[in-house]
Structure formats: structure tokens, C-alpha cells
Amino acid sequence: MKKIASILIIWLIAINVFAIFANQRLVLSPDVAYKWIDSSVQYQQQGQGFFALHNKWDSLWYLDIAKNGYSYVENSLSNIVFFPLYPLVMKFFTFGFIPLEVAGWIVSVLSLFGALIFLFKITEKFHPNISSYEPLLYLLLFPTAFFLNATYTESLFLFLSVLTFYLFLKKNYMGAGIVGLLASLTRINGVLLMIPFLIEIIINERKKEGGFEIKSFLKKSLPMLLILLGPLMFFIYHYVQFGDFFAFFNVESTFGRSFVVNQDHLAGSDFVSRSNMYFDMTIAILVFIAGVITMYRVRLSYGLYILATLFLPLSTGTLMSIGRYVLVAFPIFILMASFKNIYIKWSYVLVSILMCAMITILFVNNGWAG
């Protein structure tokens, strides 16, 4: 645990010193990554305090929920599309006197520490032929890794999803169901944890000496249904509070997410816009390949989880933020550690460091980074 804490501290210092330098030193033009971005509003903001660098874009919605609760205006941008657990934990960690901006960063860093610990434990226990520290390195170097210490849900969701995996791999199905419920109260894609959960139960049942038993399968699968309760409770709250069970989906469409291709999210004639789309497409293609390889090389449930994590946001008609959404697909990093070819590993490290630097520069300067 001391080594993991040391790795985290070194990473936090390195990436935040770079972030401060990137914000203080660079002078960037207004962002035009997407047609809908108002370049007169999203201008560079230099000379900010440390915690302000970690509170951009969606961070402001979580801060609003923690301060003012949920609000809903039909067919308009509203904060009800952001799930409740993260702002609730943020509010708790203020302890009545710590600013929410600081509390959000603390929650993200502590959650990241927990995620690193259990990712280490999964690798150590279930993949003894793989270095337990390598997946941590590949996670912290991923192009969108800066979000792991921003006021975003990435770290909290990653921690809860890794812990869910750890518990059901250890056949603690009830514990996995409870933690999976917390994950699905953090982000809608928490429901995807049901897929590897189910696959692992089926595989374990088929390995039993007596063969597959329906009664045993159903008994072990019941805790998995707890994961569905997260979104269900959130949508019931929408109905009780605002009279609209489907308010989440209505507002998501105003954020550019629906089940049709969003024309505003396609590349425009501007070079920056095209580059942004090509970057997202490259990430999506590489993650798809990683998911398929993982199914056969590492573990079936891992690969299916990677693919589900990729296809859920893609089904909303846009590539927007795909690099951030797949950050939590942690089996990718176990796959990377499983490779013996040094050229594959060093190619990942070099490219990821460069891309992570670019994303960090964009985010801290109020540019579109996912």
C-alpha cells in the first residue's frame, strides 16, 4: 500500500505541476472543437488558483447539485442528468467548512487511491503472471487521466466498479451487488457491471462438478439485480419531484445525446474540429480492438465490459467525450500489462504521455478536453 500511495503522490505532483505551468504559460485561442461551443465564453482563463484548475465544464454541474440540489427545465440544459452519489459524497467531505471545490478534489483523489489499491489486488490475485504495478502505470498515463483528479465522477466510479469486479471475482456476490448499486448511483453506465457479473456466475456454475444448476445460478444472480436499483431510484425521484420519469433522457438530448447522429458533433470545416473528431475516432477504434483482444487473451468478462463501456456512449449518436468514458474501462490496462512485447508497451507509454499532456493543457485552460 505504501508503494501505491507513493505512485499516486508522484503522479499527483507531476501532473498538477504540469497543469499549473500549462495554465500560466500558454496563450491559447478560443476553443472550436465542436460547432455548439461558444468561443466567446470558453476563453482561456489564466492565473487561477489550484482548485479552480480542477473545476471546469461538468464540474460546475456537480457543484451546483451539491449547493442547490436538482432542478429541471423541460427541453433545456438541466442538472438532472448527473447522478447523485458524487455530489452527495462531495457535500459530506466539506464537513461544514471545507469549500466544495476542495472537497470535490479530495473525493476524487481518495477514490483514485482506492481504485489503484483494488486494481492492484485484482491483478495480483487473478493474474499472477502479470506485474501488479503495470496496470496502475498504464491507467495513470492514459490520455484522459487528468480527469481522475478533477471534480468529475471518473475516480469514484472507477473505484466502485473495480471493487465490484474484485468482489464478484472472489464470489462475494452480495457485496458485489451492493457496491455495484453505489456505482450505478454514480453513473448510468454502472448498469453495465451486470454483464461481467452475469458472465462470471455462468462460468463458475459450468465449472462445478455437478454441472450447471438453474437454482444455484438464480440464487447467486439475485444480488446482481441491486445494480438496476441505482438508475431506477433516480428516475423515480425525477417522477416524484418533477413529474417526468423520463426526464433524464429528455435532458440528455439537449446535451447532444440521443439515438440519432448529432450533426453538430460531426467535424466541421475547421481544422481543430476535424482533429478533435479524428482523435475521438482513433480512441474508439483502439478501445474496440482492445476489447476484442481482451476477450480472448485475458478474460471474457473483461472484454465484454470494455466493449459495453465503449458502445453505450456511442449509441447516443456522438463520439463526444469518448476518451473520458473509456478511461474507467480498467481491464484495458490489465491487457496492456499482459503483453510481453516491449515495443507495444513503450509505444503506449510514449503516445499516452503526449496525449495526456495535450488533454491536460486543454482542460486547465478551459478548452474542450472531453
Image (spheres, rainbow, N blue to C red):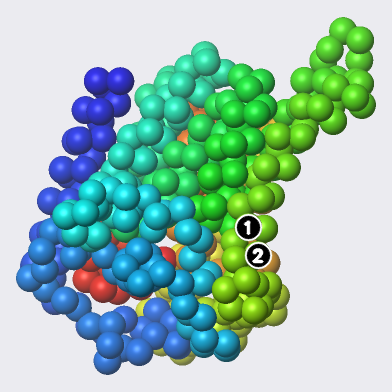
Question: Quadrant where the N terminus lies?
Answer: top left
Q: In the rendering, at what x and y percent does residue 57 appear?
A: 34, 72
Callout 2 touching callout 1 (CB < 8 Å):
yes
User: How many other residues sit within 10 Å of disc 2, few (<14), some (14-19) or many (≥20)?
Assistant: some
Give the image quarter of residue 297.
Answer: top right
Q: In the rendering, at what x and y percent does residue 248 appear?
A: 60, 72
User: How many other residues sit within 10 Å of disc 1, few (<14), some (14-19) or many (≥20)?
Assistant: few
Q: In the rendering, at what x and y percent does residue 3 appear?
A: 26, 21
> Where 139 sits versus 316, above or below?
above
Q: Which mark is residue 236?
A: 2
Question: Quadrant where the C terminus lies?
Answer: bottom left
Residue type pointed to by label 1:
Met
Q: Which of 51 and 3 is in front in this view?
A: 51
Left or right for 242, reference 360: right
Q: In the rendering, at what x and y percent does residue 173 appear?
A: 67, 27
> Where 226 sits versus 22, above or below?
above
Please report the residue visible at 26 percent of the width from the left and 35 percent of the height from the top. Answer: 8
User: Which secondary structure lies at badge 2?
Assistant: helix
Structural distance between the alpha carbons of marks 2 and 1: 5 Å
Count the labels in the image: 2
Q: Nearer the viewer, residue 175 or 30?
A: 175
Left or right for 237, reference 26: right
Q: Nearer the viewer, residue 80 or 254?
A: 80
Residue type pointed to by label 2:
Ile
- The residue under label 1 is 233
Give the image quarter of residue 356.
Answer: bottom left
